[in-house]
Amino acid sequence: MRNPYDVLGVAKGAGEAEIKKAFRKLAKAYHPDSNKDPKAAERFAEANTAYEILGDKEKRAQFDRGEIDAEGKPRATGFEGFSGFGGGRGAGFDFEGFTRARGAGGAGGAGGGAGPGGIGEDFISHIFGEAFRAGGAGPGGFARGGPARGEDVAAELSVTLEQVAGEEKMRIGLPGGRDVDVMIPKGVVDGQTIRLRGLGGSGGPRGEPGDALLTIRVLPHPLFKVEGADLRATVDLPLEDAVLGGTLRVPTLTGAVEMKVPAMTSSGRTFRLRGKGLPKKDGTRGDLFATTAITLPASDDAALTDYARRRREAKAGTA
């Protein structure tokens, strides 16, 4: 991964507005819906990763101090992306919140409580496989009546809105050199943390291992604004279609769709595309709200200019 400043083409002292503008320009140019070049998807993902760091004040400061690399991972020895809760990225995590949630149905038992993101542990076990069921730890992170339990560790997984919409599987590296395919859960939201049982620090010869706490980070998108499971987007509407009506191609996370626009449609009119938003926990999907923005011809149009002048004069004559 290249230096994020180089990726976005901005100086180290660039302001937030300049960074955001540079990201949007690159994202629009390389978005897979508008650029079919096989390398465009890589450039789009690279720009997303760079903006995830530079668009976040804390992460940007950490990168400038050399604490994280160009992918947002800590510059430290050991397993990349993970650290104990005694310091580093895991410091300050509300471990008690997790233990209280686990205790709702008995530690590791069926019907265990939901984590901070609202997804129950049994559901997470279903997603990640039975290998993650390593229950038996009591409150405070120690196995009941036995040796000390291994330390919990933290990691982050960055996903695009397209990956959330497609409920894709993603491969992540885990301690010990294992790779695991993770299916993005329905209804996942930015900042949600899920528990991966038994994938944390070693508990020694007799103790059980700790857990890995995986925080989902949804990357910003150049076209869509997220509102729960719904999405909002601004769609360019040519002047002739605004006046006469027509068919407008609207981008969605699963490909462009056609939408009928009635005659005399003004800028700012919002159309609802049902089921074109993000997946919900119940299996349904949110909606996409497309707001029109009328665009004028790129070059001078004599007929249009003459018509507009005559209309202005006519209005002035009736005033």
Image (cartoon, helix red, strand yellow):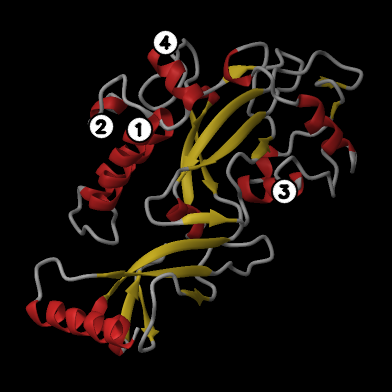
Query: Identity of the amino acid at label 2?
Result: Val
Residue under numbered circle 2:
7
* Residue under the image location 39 percent in, 28 percent down: 54
* Residue under the image location 84 percent in, 20 percent down: 140
Q: Secondary structure at mark 2?
A: helix
Relative to residue 233, is residue 237 drawn left or right? left
Residue under numbered circle 1:
50
Relative to residue 226, is residue 300 drawn left or right? left
Q: CA distance from mark 1 to mark 4?
A: 16 Å
Query: Identity of the amino acid at label 4?
Result: Arg
Q: Secondary structure at mark 1?
A: helix
Q: Earlier in the sequence, mark 4 or mark 2?
A: 2
Task: Say which of 42 and 136 sits in front.
Answer: 42
* Residue under the image location 33 percent in, 33 percent down: 19
- Asked if labels 2 and 4 touch by Cβ distance under 8 angstroms, the answer is no
Circle on res. 244 = none
Q: CA distance from mark 3 to mark 2?
A: 36 Å
In this picture, is 12 found above or below 253?
above
In this picture, is 216 found above or below 58?
below
Residue under numbered circle 3:
119
- Crowd around label 2: few <14 · some 14–19 · many ≥20 (10 Å): some
Q: Earlier in the sequence, mark 1 or mark 3?
A: 1
Residue under numbered circle 4:
65
Q: Earlier in the sequence, mark 3 or mark 2?
A: 2
Q: Earlier in the sequence, mark 1 or mark 2?
A: 2
